[in-house]
């Protein structure tokens, strides 16, 4: 009877140990199918449901994560040079803004400080008409880990400015940065030949929102999980009954001109112009016939993403591993029981006490 009870305890212990070992190995699995530095398990938990549509000079994207009491959604739309971003979450308030790619300027660095100051602007070209009826070209592809990546390309009617928007269901590596599924990357390309010798270029943006924009030295994209580096951000947080929600527009502090990295200076927002932003580029004494490419991001601070990112990793059992571990441990325990039984029998035969 004692032996039977010991055996039962040993077998139960074997099963428990097998579960622990198998689960530990499963949780430790950090597979990264597409090599973007983000584990597949996190990408699975934060993959968004995305719907996109295109018509003429406009497109719209709706991105959703979660269900029931814990869910959020952001919508991004574009029409003739203006983007609209809207975000909401369960039990929270809505937050939104409009961002217009407003104008293109040429300027001369009269005082030599490397940034555009009042009185230095040579020409200003309004970009609204340049994007009116400019067709949106859309495409999509499936990444190595199964997520769909959407791309929208718009070229201005005069060919001077191009807008390239990328949005993905899962994390996506683009150049040296990682695009999260809560963001859309907007690359603006400006034909550098617009500036004559001694002139520089600048892009002007105009933001529309019911809230007060806040300028940050670092973007959420940069600070949250090192998805990007060296960025500034304007964010807008709506508060009220329920949880606050935040949307943002960020930009890289380095642009690329003719394959060379150049610094980006910005002006605004300010007390006199709280909804304006200008990014300026000092091209030096000559303006080679190439393009200036500015990386920017339109995004949201997803409440559901943060919940899932900080949650404990899911424990997923591995059946073959469990079976193998159980068999090995059970064999070891069984051998121990047999040896103990033989030792007890030997003591009985020799008349010794255990």
Image (tube, rainbow, N blue to C red):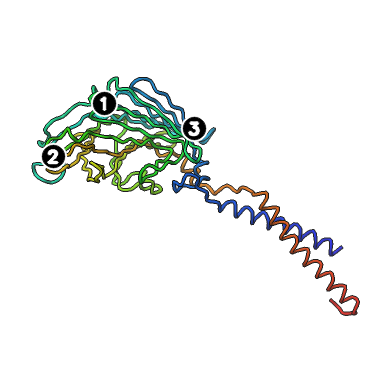
Above or below residue 49? Residue 254 is below
Q: Earlier in the sequence, mark 3 or mark 2?
A: 3
Q: Earlier in the sequence, mark 1 or mark 2?
A: 2
Above or below residue 6? Residue 291 is above
Residue identifier under label 3: 49
SS state under label 2: loop
Quarter-of-image position of residue 278: top left
Q: As rendered, which of 18 and 321 lies closer to the eye?
A: 321
Task: Give the CA separation, mark 3 to mark 1.
Answer: 30 Å
Q: Is residue 91 visible?
A: no
Quarter-of-image position of residue 243: top left
Q: Farthest residue toward the left?
A: 110
Q: As rendered, which of 294 and 193 lies closer to the eye?
A: 193
Mark nearer the viewer, 1 or 2: 1
Mark nearer the viewer, 3 or 2: 3
Q: Position of residue 61 (x, y in %)?
A: 41, 28
SS state under label 3: strand
Label 3 crowding class (10 Å Cα cut-off): few <14, some 14-19, many 20+? some
* Residue at image point 64% right, 49% down: 318
Task: Give the CA separation, mark 3 to mark 2.
Answer: 44 Å
**Circle number at residue 174:** none
Residue identifier under label 1: 156
**Circle number at residue 117:** 2
Quarter-of-image position of residue 68: top right
Q: Is residue 219 visible?
A: yes
SS state under label 1: loop
| Mark 3–mark 1 CB contact (< 8 Å) | no
Which quadrant does the C terminus fall into?
bottom right
């Amino acid at each position: 009877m004692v032996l039977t009870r010991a055996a039962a305890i040993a077998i139960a212990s074997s099963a428990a140990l097998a579960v622990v070992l198998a689960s530990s190995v499963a949780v430790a699995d950090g597979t990264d199918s597409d090599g973007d530095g983000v584990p597949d398990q996190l990408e699975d938990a934060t993959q968004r449901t995305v719907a996109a549509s295109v018509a003429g000079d406009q497109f719209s994207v709706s991105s959703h994560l979660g269900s029931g009491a814990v869910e959020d959604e952001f919508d991004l739309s574009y029409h003739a040079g203006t983007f609209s971003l809207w975000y909401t979450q369960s039990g929270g308030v809505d937050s939104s803004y409009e961002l217009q790619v407003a104008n293109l300027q040429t300027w001369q660095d009269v005082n030599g400080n490397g940034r555009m100051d009042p009185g230095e602007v040579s020409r200003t070209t309004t970009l609204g008409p340049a994007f009116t009826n400019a067709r949106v070209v859309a495409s999509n592809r499936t990444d190595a880990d199964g997520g769909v990546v959407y791309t929208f390309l718009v070229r201005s009617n005069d060919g001077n400015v191009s807008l390239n928007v990328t949005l993905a269901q899962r994390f996506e590596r683009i150049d040296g940065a990682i695009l999260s599924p809560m963001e859309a990357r907007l690359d603006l390309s400006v034909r550098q030949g617009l500036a004559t010798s001694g002139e520089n270029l600048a892009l002007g943006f105009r933001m529309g929102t019911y809230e007060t924009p806040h300028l940050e030295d670092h973007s959420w994209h940069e600070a949250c999980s090192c998805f990007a580096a060296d960025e500034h951000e304007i964010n807008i947080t709506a508060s009220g009954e329920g949880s606050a929600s935040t949307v943002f527009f960020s930009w890289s502090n380095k642009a690329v001109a003719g394959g060379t990295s150049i610094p980006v200076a910005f002006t605004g927002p300010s007390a006199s112009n709280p909804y304006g932003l200008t990014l300026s580029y000092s091209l030096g004494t000559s303006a080679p016939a190439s393009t200036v490419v500015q990386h920017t991001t339109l995004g949201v601070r997803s409440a559901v993403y943060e919940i899932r990112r900080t949650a404990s990793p899911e424990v997923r059992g591995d059946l073959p591993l469990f079976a193998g571990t159980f068999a090995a441990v059970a064999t070891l325990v069984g051998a121990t029981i047999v040896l103990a039984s033989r030792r007890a029998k030997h003591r009985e035969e020799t008349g010794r006490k255990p």
